Image (tube, coloured by chain):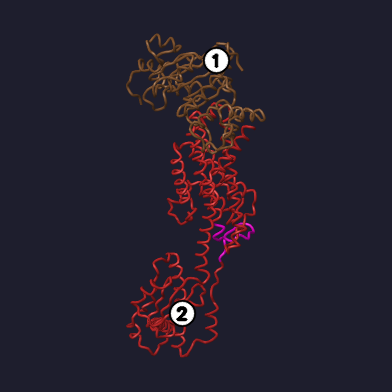
């Protein structure tokens, strides 16, 4: 586990732009920022702002059109391939096999990460217990509620004890109990040093969760800093106010 | 290796969960091969085992109508029922209302017509030999030509059966005509009947037709509906795997599982290899089951037994190449389709078209030239060529060169296109 007092950067994003094939405009334009080890960075913005695209580029799922993303381990520049095993990814979609049981899903992705029994079995038992799913570990996911699937989706992202965790809308569509369970676990992991890059439309949840905020609109960074500083700078009462002030009330596609 | 094993287990679990896919891959081809073989075998028996039901209305006032009926009975290809004294106008209704597939109508002047024709020919022949008959040649010339018989088909009887029936009938009438002509010739020369010695020769001296399949080497293989259908429908079954594998790939892509694997180093290719391994096993077990059914179950229900090829290595090679071609095509469809509906719809229709042009349903040789050329584009055609060389011609390596080259090329092309697509989508 990493040292939580170490505040060195782990990502340095410089002038990154992204244009999808056949798209008329850029989804991201000249985006630059750093990610500091151990922080909880929230990326917010209206629909189509480029949040998921940015997370996908950082986690190596999508290639960038231009710009540079540098990766660091212990303040030393490193290749993406070396940082990849330290990454956990929790996508917005239920990226899991509904035909398999919760344990079979966790076991499969754990083994793909190179984990072996009995450590893997122990890890699965712990995760299921923490997320309140230990009594349904042998049930197929097709029979799970949305909240239960969301928790399994998170558990799969945590199976390899990641040092850097990408969370794309981790609590979308879940009840308050599941939300509390998920956010509690994430805070505990962060307290142990896991860096988190997080997007959500639950702005109240984000206000409590994030150390630092990145606001995107039309693929550009329009504000960056701690929530406290940003609220003061823009004379806003909440993250929601801040977003409305900066991006307007017009509906987005 | 652990990743590959984990992926294998996952694929097997997913496959076992996909009951509809399993039914499509294992049960549907079995049903098809049973039904098609039984139907084709029945058709074969229909014309070869005395089962084509024919009604004969013999209104002939002379003896030749009876001779024709007797010949039809002795031919052994028909089940004959004779009803005499029925009016010509009633024949269509009689055929449609009854259970007969055709009605043969022998008119009242059948013997007379044949006899008149024979007399005319006899007159000409004797005249050519410088012999005169008592008959007035002008009288012969005035006689009408034979009116012939009528054959009224039930419209459901397929054209091939109609042609078979007409050919049989033509042969029998020709025989009767010949005999009548000779009889007339002898009568004109003063004999009251054909001498027994000549008659015996006429009946005996038939040119025997020996029909046998062209084959290299010594083989006991007999072309029949089983030898044709089991390999053909096994190939169709393997390619129909596109429904299961294609939609499986799309589903994993849409669900985001592929995206998750992208963030796990080296895991994606393990997952793909495991998928190909499991479906290769499925394809080869499909073949084994279909062939085992042909060998062990078909004889129990009265169908011809499947004779496996003598050359085991070429047989294994064609089986593996066919399986790889089917899986590679399914993988390609799965990587290009955007939805499961697209993969299922395009996959199924493309395989049906490949099967149709590839000779699975109708042999390629009956197609027009341009369709024969088009059929060579179908991977099913080349799989079939390979299996037919083995199952029907007992072929060896030389005959398999074409199918092997095509199937390897097709497999490489599909794999390349699938990998290119996955590369473009940044999964690998």
Looking at the picture, how far across and down is residue B112, in whole percent? 39, 84
Decide which of A242, B130 is in the foreground and name it.
A242
Between disc 2 and disc 1, the foreground one is 1
Looking at the picture, how far across and down is residue A190, in whole percent? 55, 18
Q: Chain of mark 1?
A: A
Looking at the picture, how far across and down is residue B244, in whole percent? 51, 43
Q: Which residue: 45% across, 82% down?
A: B66
Decide which of B77, A209 is in the foreground and name it.
A209
Q: Which residue: 50% across, 30% down?
A: A150
Magenta stretch bounds: B211-228
| Residue B215 part of the magenta segment | yes
Distance (Cα) linking label 2 and label 1: 102 Å
When asked about the image quadrant of residue B411, the answer is: top right
- The hue of chain A in the figure is brown
Q: Chain of mark 2?
A: B
Asked if labels 1 and 2 touch by Cβ distance under 8 angstroms, the answer is: no
Q: Are marks 2 and 1 on the same chain?
A: no
Q: In the picture shown, does residue A69 fall above or below A158?
A: above
Question: Residue A38 got which mark?
Answer: 1
Which chain's colour is red? B
How many residues crowd mark 1 within 10 Å: few (<14), some (14–19), many (20+)? Answer: many
When asked about the image quadrant of residue A24, the answer is: top left
For this orientation, the residue located farthest to the front is: A177
For this orientation, the residue located farthest to the right is: A118
Question: Residue B69 got which mark?
Answer: 2
- Label count reads 2
Secondary structure at numbered mark 1: loop
Question: Residue A157 got which mark?
Answer: none
How many residues crowd mark 2 within 10 Å: few (<14), some (14–19), many (20+)? Answer: many
């Amino acid at each position: 586990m990493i040292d939580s007092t170490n505040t060195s950067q782990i990502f340095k994003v410089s002038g990154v732009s992204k244009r999808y094939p056949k798209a008329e405009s850029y989804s991201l334009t000249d985006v630059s920022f750093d990610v500091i080890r151990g922080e909880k960075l929230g990326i917010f913005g209206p629909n189509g702002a480029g949040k998921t695209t940015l997370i996908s580029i950082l986690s190596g799922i999508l290639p960038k059109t231009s710009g540079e993303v540098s990766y660091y381990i212990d303040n030393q520049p490193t290749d993406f391939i070396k940082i990849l095993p330290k990454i956990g990814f929790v996508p917005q979609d239920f990226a899991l096999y509904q035909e398999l049981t919760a344990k079979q899903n966790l076991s499969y992705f754990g083994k793909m990460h190179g984990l072996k029994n009995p450590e893997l079995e122990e890890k699965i038992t712990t995760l299921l217990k923490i997320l309140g799913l230990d009594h349904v570990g042998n049930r197929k996911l097709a029979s799970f509620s949305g909240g239960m699937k969301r928790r399994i989706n998170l558990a799969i992202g945590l199976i390899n004890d990641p040092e850097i965790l990408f969370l794309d809308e981790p609590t979308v569509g879940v009840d308050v109990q599941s939300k509390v369970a998920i956010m509690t676990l994430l805070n505990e992991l962060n307290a142990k040093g896991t860096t988190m890059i997080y997007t959500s439309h639950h702005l109240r949840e984000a206000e409590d969760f994030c150390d630092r905020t990145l606001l995107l609109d039309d693929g550009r960074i329009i504000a960056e800093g701690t929530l406290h500083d940003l609220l003061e700078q823009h004379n806003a009462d909440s993250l929601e106010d801040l977003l409305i002030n900066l991006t307007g009330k017009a509906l987005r596609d | 290796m652990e990743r590959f094993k984990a992926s294998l287990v996952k694929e097997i679990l997913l496959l076992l969960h996909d009951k509809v896919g399993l039914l499509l891959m294992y049960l549907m081809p079995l049903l098809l091969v049973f039904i098609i073989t039984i139907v084709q075998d029945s058709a074969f028996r229909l014309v070869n085992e005395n089962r084509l039901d024919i009604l004969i209305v013999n209104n002939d006032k002379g003896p030749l109508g009876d001779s024709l009926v007797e010949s039809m009975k002795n031919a052994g290809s028909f089940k004959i029922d004779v009803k005499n004294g029925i009016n010509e106008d009633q024949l269509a209704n009689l055929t449609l209302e009854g259970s007969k597939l055709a009605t043969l109508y022998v008119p009242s002047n059948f013997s007379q017509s044949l006899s008149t024709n024979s007399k005319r020919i006899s007159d000409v022949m004797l005249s050519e030999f410088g012999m005169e008959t008592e008959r007035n040649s002008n009288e012969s010339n005035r006689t009408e030509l034979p009116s012939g018989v009528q054959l009224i088909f039930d419209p459901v009887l397929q054209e091939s059966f109609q042609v078979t029936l007409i050919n049989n009938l033509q042969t029998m009438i020709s025989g009767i005509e010949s005999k009548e002509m000779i009889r007339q010739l002898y009568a004109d020369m003063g004999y009251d009947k054909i001498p027994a010695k000549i008659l015996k020769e006429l009946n005996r001296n038939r040119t025997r037709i020996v029909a046998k399949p062209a084959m290299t080497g010594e083989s006991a293989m007999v072309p029949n509906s089983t030898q044709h259908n089991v390999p053909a429908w096994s190939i169709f079954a393997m390619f129909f795997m596109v429904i299961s594998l294609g939609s499986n790939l799309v589903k994993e892509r849409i669900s985001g599982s592929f995206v998750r694997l992208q963030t796990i180093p080296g895991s994606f290719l393990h997952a793909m290899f495991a998928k190909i391994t499991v479906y290769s096993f499925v394809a080869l077990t499909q073949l084994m089951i279909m062939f085992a059914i042909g060998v062990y179950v078909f004889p129990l229900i009265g169908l011809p037994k499947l004779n496996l090829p003598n050359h085991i290595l070429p047989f294994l090679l064609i089986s593996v190449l066919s399986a790889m071609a089917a899986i590679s095509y399914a993988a390609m469809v799965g990587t290009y389709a955007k939805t499961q509906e697209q993969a299922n719809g395009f996959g199924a229709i493309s395989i049906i078209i490949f099967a149709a042009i590839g000779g699975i349903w109708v042999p390629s040789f009956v197609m027009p030239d341009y369709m024969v050329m088009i059929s060579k584009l179908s991977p099913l055609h080349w799989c079939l060529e390979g299996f037919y060389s083995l199952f029907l011609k007992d072929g060896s390596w030389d005959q398999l060169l074409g199918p092997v080259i095509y199937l390897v090329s097709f497999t490489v092309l599909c794999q390349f296109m699938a990998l290119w697509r996955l590369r473009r989508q940044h999964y690998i």
